[in-house]
Amino acid sequence: MTLYGKEDRELNLLMEAPEPRLRRRSFLQVAGLLAAAGVAGYAGGTVAGWGDDNPDAGAALAQPLPGNRRNERLLNIYNWSDYIDDRTIPVFQALTNIRVNYDVFSSNEDLLAKLRAGPTEYDIIVPTSDFIPTYLKLGLIEPLRQDLIPNLTNLDKEFVETDYDPGNRYTVPWQWGTTGIGYNRAKVPGGKLESWSAVFEPDSAATGRVTLLREATDLIGCALIYLGKSPNSIDDADLAEVVKLVRSARPKLKGFTTDTYIDELAASETWVAQAWSGDVFQAQDQNQDVSYAIPKEGSLRFVDVMAIPKGAPHPANAARFMNYVLHPKVQARISKYVSYGTPVSLAKPLLPPDQTADPSIYPPASTKLSILTLTGQKLQKWQAAYNQIVK
Ligand code: N2P
């Protein structure tokens, strides 16, 4: 693979001064405008320097691609909100002449419900890895065209030798991170937070300024950790304690959210939020008083993975996108922007050293972090507990 071609437009894009951050809405507007310009607009984009990452060149850009169920140069992606930079999609479109529709969801529960409701148009979805056994059991995803994803060899071993999908037959990691607390140093006593008590037993002075994640696994898992239980417990008594704890916190909460807390923290509208690591750093870019903590009681680590819904219209286009995303320069660009961890170590030399050295983004092995497993009855039991808390 050519990493540093002379005319490597990807590298040039990466080295340019960072753009002001595009919020979710403005990103979608940009994507919409690009899409409205039509695929012909992208065919003019040169592919020089892309080398063996771009098998399509010149006139071939207009031809249908083999391996899709529908003969269209189209790709429908369904990813989490605030989880991509503003260049990756336009550059992919320009390089491949595949038009991308990019849509966002806000929780694993929403994503799974949508997929269970019947066929969708999506070619790529990005569930959290602990949900993969459920997707497989329900027959909701299909094997990848690995022959179209040679960059799978770029993945770090720990993202290949997994228990949820050994050998990446069904999934390709997108980014990974931790669950913790985003907080405003100017608003919390002593300017520092260290315990889950800040969100599960909030200070009265913070009433209406605290949010919890609207995501069953993080909510239940972290509450179990705070209560000193196993983060994988399905014990009825443990779950009853979790329900009691979070229900008594409710009157002090602003609410449960996964897709508004970046803006709320940035605007100092909220002071304390159960949050995913990179999201908090995105808020910090806008408000220097915002900090991130992995509580002393320990927390959770997650990997979000790309997968192809069974029967998706454009599985070959999806595989091409996965291959593109595994390019170290693309990984670096996404990771730099969203401040989550990359599963491709080859991308790390291309990232700002203050990011790769940041223990909040790349926690040392000594940090108390668990990875959830959602096998057996756990999902149903946790969902029931979550419904008693949130609904
Ligand atoms: C990005 C959300 C990360 C997803 N905004 C957590 N699984």
Image: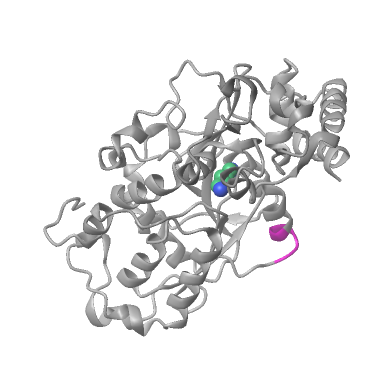
Please state if 347 lies on the left or on the right of 267 as rendered.
left
Display coloring: one colour
Q: Give the range drawn in magenta.
A: 114-118
- From what the image shows, is residue 289 above or below residue 57? above
- Residue 275 picture quarter: top right
> Where in the image, quadrant-wise, is ligand 1 located?
top right
Please state if 81 lies on the left or on the right of 172 as rendered.
right
Res. 148 in view: yes
Please report the residue visible at 56 percent of the width from the left and 45 percent of the height from the top: 266
How many numbered dots are placed on residues in this image? 0
- From what the image shows, is residue 203 above or below residue 252? above
Q: Position of residue 313 (x, y in %)?
A: 54, 71
Please state if 149 lies on the left or on the right of 110 as rendered.
left
- From what the image shows, is residue 141 above or below residue 249? below
Q: Position of residue 316 (x, y in %)?
A: 44, 66
Q: Where is residue 157 in the image (x, y as percent from the top left)?
A: 38, 33
Give the main secondary structure, helix, strand or loop, of the magenta stretch: helix
Please report the residue visible at 69 percent of the width from the left and 59 percent of the height from the top: 115
Res. 169 in view: no
Q: Where is residue 174 in the image (x, y as percent from the top left)?
A: 46, 47
Q: Which residue lies furthest to the left in this view?
A: 6
- From what the image shows, is residue 104 above or below residue 128? below
- Taking the magenta stretch, the answer to whether it contains residue 156 is no
Please state if 45 lies on the left or on the right of 248 as rendered.
left
